[in-house]
Image (cartoon, rainbow, N blue to C red):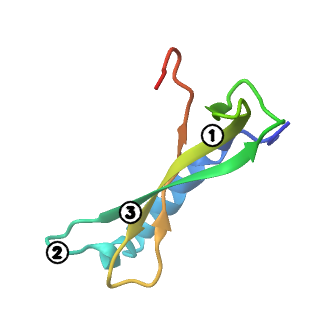
């Protein structure tokens, strides 16, 4: 078992934090140029193994015949050149695509 708590159970927390920041005027500090919000995207793998895997794992097949199983996500973050802090949004999980081949 990789993680007993589904990530979707905590996604509501991201929205609650966003609403609190908006209500308290914190988000205004992130506005840049013509009042736009800048979002930086980063991709990451948060699990990788050559042995442990589950039905949701993505697979990377190597030329030497081995397979690496992994979970990854794209993490959006609100940024501003005027702020030292950032505000992260809920991640978008990279899912296996049926029938997808390179």
How far, Cα to Cα, is label 2 from label 1? 33 Å
How far, Cα to Cα, is label 1 from label 3? 22 Å
**In what element is the residue under mark 3?**
strand
Q: Label 3: which residue?
A: 40
Position in image of residue 102 (x %, y %): 46, 26
The residue lying at 47 percent from left, 79 percent from top is 85
Residue 15 position (above or below residue 2): below
**Dot 2 or dot 1, earlier in sequence:** 1
Q: Label 2: which residue?
A: 33
Q: Is residue 91 visible?
A: no
Side of 35 where 21 appears, left or right: right
Position in image of residue 94 (x %, y %): 54, 38
Q: Label 1: which residue?
A: 8
User: Residue 2, located in which quarter of the rendered image?
Assistant: top right
Between marks 1 and 3 in the image, the one whose residue lies nearer the viewer: 3
| 87 and 17: which is toward the camera | 87
Residue 93 position (above or below residue 42): above
The residue lying at 52 percent from left, 62 percent from top is 17
Q: Is residue 77 visible?
A: yes
Between marks 2 and 3 in the image, the one whose residue lies nearer the viewer: 3
């Amino acid at each position: 078992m990789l993680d007993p708590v589904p990530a979707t159970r905590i996604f509501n927390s991201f929205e609650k934090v966003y609403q609190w920041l908006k209500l308290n005027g914190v988000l205004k500090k992130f506005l840049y140029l013509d009042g736009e919000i800048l979002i930086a995207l980063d991709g990451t793998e948060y699990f990788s193994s050559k042995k442990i895997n589950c039905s949701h794992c993505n697979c990377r097949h190597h030329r030497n015949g081995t397979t690496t199983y992994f979970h990854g996500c794209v993490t959006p973050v609100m940024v501003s050149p005027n702020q030292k802090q950032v505000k992260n949004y809920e991640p978008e999980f990279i899912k296996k695509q049926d029938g997808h081949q390179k």
